[in-house]
Amino acid sequence: MDQEIRGIYETRLPLECVWSGREVASRSNLDVDHALPFALWQDSSSWNLFPATASINNQKRDKLPTMELVRRRKEVIVSYWELLFEASPTRFALESRKLAGPQLAVTPEGGNWQNPLFSTFIEAIEYTASSRGVPRWEP
C-alpha cells in the first residue's frame, strides 16, 4: 500500500468512503482502495487511490465499480483528486498525465483538469471491464 497517500488521508479524518458515502472516522477503519484493482492494473498512482471503509474495500476486492456508481460518486472522486493534488502536486500531476496524456494541464491555474481526467478514468474502467471480463460491483 502507498504509505504517502494513506498518510495524506489519515491527516484528513474523518473522511467519506468513496464508494458508500459512509464516514471513515478512524485509522483502523480506513482502507485505501485501488479503484482499478492492483491485480488488474499493477498501478498505485495517486489518481487511482481512494479512502474507503475497511468493510467496503473488502467487499469490492478485485472488482470494478459500476459505471453508474462512478458517475454518482464523481464529486467525491474529484474532491479526493483535488486533495491529493494539493498535498503532492508534482506527483499527482505526473501520474495523472501518465493516464490522461501529456496535454493534461494539472496545475493550480490549469483550469479544468478534473473533467478530462474523470473522462479518462471512466474510459480506463470500461476498457478494463470489457477486455478482462472483470465483475462489476456496487455496495
Image (spheres, rainbow, N blue to C red):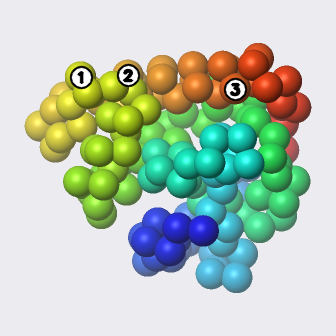
**Left or right of 131 in this view: 111:** left
Marks 2/3 in contact by CB < 8 Å: the verdict is: no
User: Type of residue at label 3?
Assistant: Thr
Q: Which residue is mark 3?
A: 128
Q: Looking at the picture, tell me which residue is in the foreground, 132 or 62.
A: 132
User: Type of residue at label 1?
Assistant: Gln
Q: Which residue is mark 1?
A: 103
Q: Is residue 69 above or below residue 126?
A: below
How many residues crowd around disc 1 within 10 Å: few (fewer than 14), some, or many (20 or more)? few
Q: Looking at the picture, tell me which residue is in the foreground, 122 or 111.
A: 122
Q: Position of residue 25 (x, y in %)?
A: 63, 75
**Residue 132 falls in image quadrant:** top right
Q: Position of residue 69 (x, y in %)?
A: 71, 31
How far, Cα to Cα, is label 2 from label 3?
Answer: 18 Å
Residue beneath the point at 30% across and 63% down:
87
Q: Position of residue 98 (x, y in %)?
A: 38, 36
How many residues crowd around disc 3 within 10 Å: few (fewer than 14), some, or many (20 or more)? some
Q: Is residue 139 above or below residue 84?
A: above
